[in-house]
Amino acid sequence: MFEKIIAQGKAKKILSEQIKNNKIPHAYIFMGEEGTGKMLTAIEFAKILNCQINDYSQTDSGSCGHCLACEHIDKGSYSDLHIINFEKQDELADKETEKGKAKLGIKVIRYMQDKVYLKATEGKWKVFIIEPAEKMTIEAFNCLLKTLEEPPENTIIILIAKHKETIPVTILSRVQTVFFQPLSVEDISKYLQENNSLSQENALKIALMSDGSIEKAENLIVNTQNEFSTFWTELSGKKIAASDILAKSKQAAKDRETALEAITIITENAMVSFRKNPGKYADIIEALSKSKKYLELNANPANVMDNLFMYVNNKIAK
């Protein structure tokens, strides 16, 4: 089961054994950083439980992937799978001013409760996924608590969150926590080569910067093609003249947002060099971090970027 989920052997083993033994808790919390497979696992869980071809009580082969239930779940059109998130909250908003809130409120949880106590319409199980659970308000958590205390049959609630400390103890005590670990550099590199047609060298470079997250790795694919990524390669290779450095600084400092983006991309690339040679690049990483803070405190972007780029150039030239 869960063959499509990268790594996460411990999490997959826990869930697979519960499914095969038909001892499935009514509520889980999938805990871990973004891009480690939490949502994909929750979706696959729903497919396994509702697959019309492979009966989870008779086989451990997982979902078939091509029956109507599997196809509808993949397309997001399965009536017994409900995603409770900011998009759903905006959909339920009565006024334009209620949209775009930073917290999941009680209204969207009450919507979920209305659905929880209805009978399944297409499959055997109703599955509710709340993401990001750590963004719920206290009122929303308290409202959810009532459902967790009296769960209906054949209903599973899966909370998805990053950190245990963001979830009230009263909630944690009523759900099973399944931890998702950061992915290895090897796993991410292999994934990028197979799914994004990257060379082994580029895939490894991005994997080293991804902090164990597929999501971050895929975002970095775009960033590594950015001109400031190329700039770091030229700078660290001592292949750029001082006049070109100042020209690049001017380009990066056209506004605060561009300057922050430039520093973020350069830092991501510089971290690869730092891991290979910490002694040589430690001061540069610190300078990048300080420059970012100066920009966030509304320092003049032109002054910050000029000072930063010339400092980095001088440091590497030594």
Image: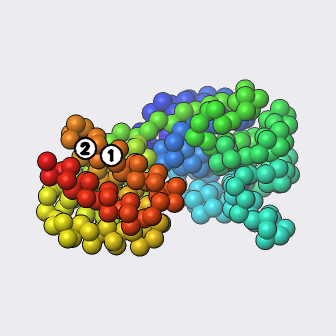
Answer with the quarter of the image where residue 29 lies.
top right
> Is 103 situated above or below 248?
above
* Rendered image: mark on residue 145: none
Amino acid of disc 2? Tyr
Q: Nearer the viewer, residue 250 or 201?
A: 250
Q: Is residue 127 visible?
A: no
- Residue shown at the point (51%, 47%) measured from the top left: 34
How far across and how far down the image is residue 69, in percent?
63, 56
* Rendered image: mark on residue 285: 1
Horizontal side of 317 relative to 131 (left or right) equals left
Q: Is mark 2 on a helix, strand or loop?
A: helix
Answer with the quarter of the image where residue 125 lies.
top right
Amino acid of disc 1? Ile
- Residue shown at the point (55%, 29%) measured from the top left: 14
Horizontal side of 175 relative to 119 (left or right) equals left
How far across and how far down the image is residue 93, in percent?
80, 65
How far across and how far down the image is residue 35, in percent?
48, 48
Q: Do the residues labelled 2 and 1 touch (CB within 8 Å)?
A: yes
Q: Residue tagged by mark 2? A: 281
- Residue shown at the point (34%, 73%) measured from the top left: 251
How far across and how far down the image is residue 92, in percent?
80, 63
